[in-house]
Amino acid sequence: MNWIWDIRSRDGAMNGLEFARCLTAGGFDRVLVHAAPAHASVEIRTDDGGVVARGDVDRTGEYSPMTLLAHEGGTFRRSEIWPTDELYGLPVLLPGGEVGVLTHWAHAEDRTWWRWSVEFSNHTGRPADWAPAGQPVQR
């Protein structure tokens, strides 16, 4: 079953502003979010509308271009991170709603620059839990 990730910034307007609405295969306990808002609400729903998890996730440390969201028993844990190769294969949720898979990350020791690669794939009809053959994906 597919999951729909809704991320809203709580930093604007009366009800916040939509940051991303992303579709992934189901069962991902962890995802990366690029340029995540400092104050966000996250909700995961199944294709048929059932709520998997929802909650508020606020940045507690310094800004990082990547945020790791871990889904644990209906709640979320948020970490501002600088990815390492052990996170390759995780989905990356991008502002606006695209989803890719992290394939590479490099950054300067002083974190003044970073370079990264994300692989994108798609399928018509949104089949549940689809992934292209040979794409290394982590759950």
Image (spheres, rainbow, N blue to C red):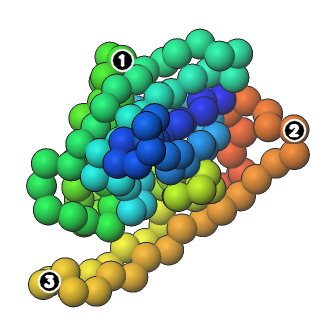
Q: Earlier in the sequence, mark 2 or mark 3?
A: 3
Mark 3 is on which residue type? Glu
Q: Is residue 73 left or right of residue 96?
A: left
| Image coords of residue 1 (percent x, y) | 66, 23
Q: Earlier in the sequence, mark 1 or mark 2?
A: 1
The residue that disc 2 covers is: 125
The reply to whether residue 133 is in sight is yes
User: Which of 76 and 9 lies nearest the eye of the viewer?
Assistant: 9
Crowd band around label 3 with a 10 angstrom C-alpha radius: few (<14), some (14–19), many (20+): few
Identify the image quadrant of the C terminus: top left
107 versus 74 height, above or below:
below
> Mark 1 — residue?
74
Residue 98 percent coordinates (x, y) = 62, 56
Tell me which residue sits at (60%, 66%) in the image. Answer: 119
Looking at the image, the residue that sits furthest to the front is 14
Question: Which mark is on residue 109?
Answer: 3
What is the distance, in whole Å, between disc 2 and disc 3 at their CAs?
A: 43 Å
Disc 3, SS: loop
Q: What residue is drawn where x is 52% and y is 58%? A: 94
Residue 135 is drawn in which quadrant? Answer: bottom right
> What amino acid is found at the position of numbered circle 2 in the picture?
Gly
Q: Which element is circle 1 on?
A: loop
- Secondary structure under tag 2 reads loop
**57 and 52: which one is in front?**
57
